[in-house]
Structure formats: C-alpha cells, structure tokens
Amino acid sequence: MKRSKLLAPILTVFMLCFGAAPAFADNGPDLIFRRSVDFKLLTPNDKLATYAIDDPIIDGVACYYTAHEKGGVAGMFGVAEQSSEVSLACRQYGPIKFKEKFGQGDTAFSERRSLLFKRMHIVRGCDAKRNVLVYMVYSDKLVEGSPESSTSTVAIQPWTGQAEVPRCGEYLNR
C-alpha cells in the first residue's frame, strides 16, 4: 500500500515534467478516437489517434489530425519518439470571427512528439486573394527535421446570421 502511494506522485511529476501527456492541458487537443494498428502481447499496442483542436485566435475553425502513437515498453512509459507522419483536415463549423491579427506561418498548436527534442506544429496562413485559411502540420527535431507534412484549407464562407464574411487578409500582420 505504501509503495503505490509513493509511486503515483512520482509518475505524475515525471509525466508533467517530460510532456508525456499533452492532453491534460486546458488548451490541449480533444481525443476523438483511437484504433489499434498492431498487437503487442504484454505492452500497449501501437495506435492511430484522431484529435480535434479549435484555432485559438479564429472562432469557427477546427482542425482534426491523426497521429501514430507508439506502444511497446517505451510507449507505455511515455518516452517513445513518435513518428512524423500526421494527417490534417481543417473545417469551418460556425461563423468565422478573428480575435486578433496573425502572421503567415504562425503556430496555431504545438505538442511534444518525443521526450526531449521533437515537436509537432500546426501553423496557419492566409491566401488573401481567395479568402482561404491555410493550415500545415509538420514535425521538427533539434538535430534533423522531417519533410513529412500535410496541408488543409478552410474557404471562409458566409454563415447563417452572419452579416458580413470577414476577409482573412485584413487580419494579417504585415
């Protein structure tokens, strides 16, 4: 009994310090579902997990991404380096409202993909000519980046009850 009381706080501190559980943050992604992609007898399976995030500065836009989550012993302890392959789809789900100006390539969301050196980023831009928001997901690494990426677009459309369709170009920092 004493051992389990001591182990729980140690595991919590470890996970918080090393970012092993990014979904615990208030602004973290919402898990939609997970599917196992292989079987491991004594340790967790590798999985594909689909998450949703709301754009923090643009109301009415959500991005969904699917990422590989490694199982095995390293995955069980939250120390596995996750792969760079991530798919992305962003959609308008309500009236678009810009909360502030943004720059081309500004980060909309970022999360750790390894214990120390690798991060996944979702960045946003604006195609002002077509009034389209453009989102890209990629991974970086301290020593060597990855060319793996995915792009999604959101054509800003009128929404019921919305008087005017905002133009993303008006909210770009120039």
Image (cartoon, rainbow, N blue to C red):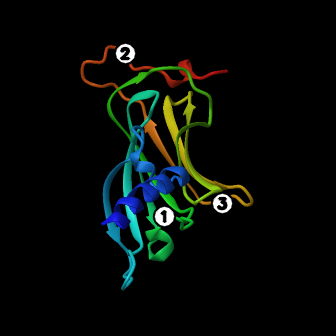
- In the picture, measured across the screen, residue 3 lies left or right of residue 144, that is left
Between disc 1 and disc 2, the foreground one is 1
Residue ranking furthest to the left: 160
Q: Position of residue 122 (x, y in %)?
A: 53, 45
Number of residues whose C-alpha sits closer than 10 Å to that of mark 3, classed few (under 14), some (14–19) or many (20 or more): few
Q: Which mark is residue 78?
A: 1
Residue ranking furthest to the front: 2
Number of residues whose C-alpha sits closer than 10 Å to that of mark 1, classed few (under 14), some (14–19) or many (20 or more): many
The residue lying at 44 percent from left, 73 percent from top is 71
Check whether the beta carbons of the residues at disc 1 and disc 2 lie within 8 A of each other. Answer: no
Which one is nearer the viewer's eye here, 78 or 174? 78
Which residue lies under the disc numbered 2? 164
Q: For residue 116, which quarter of the picture?
A: bottom right
Q: Examine the rendering and report whether any part of residue 66 can be seen.
A: no
Which one is nearer the viewer's eye here, 140 or 171? 140
Which residue lies under the disc numbered 3? 146
Disc nearer the start of the sequence (3/2)? 3
Please tell me whether mark 2 sits on a helix, a strand or a loop: loop
Disc nearer the start of the sequence (1/2)? 1
Residue 122, relative to residue 78: is it above or below?
above
- In the picture, measured across the screen, residue 126 lies left or right of residue 71, that is right
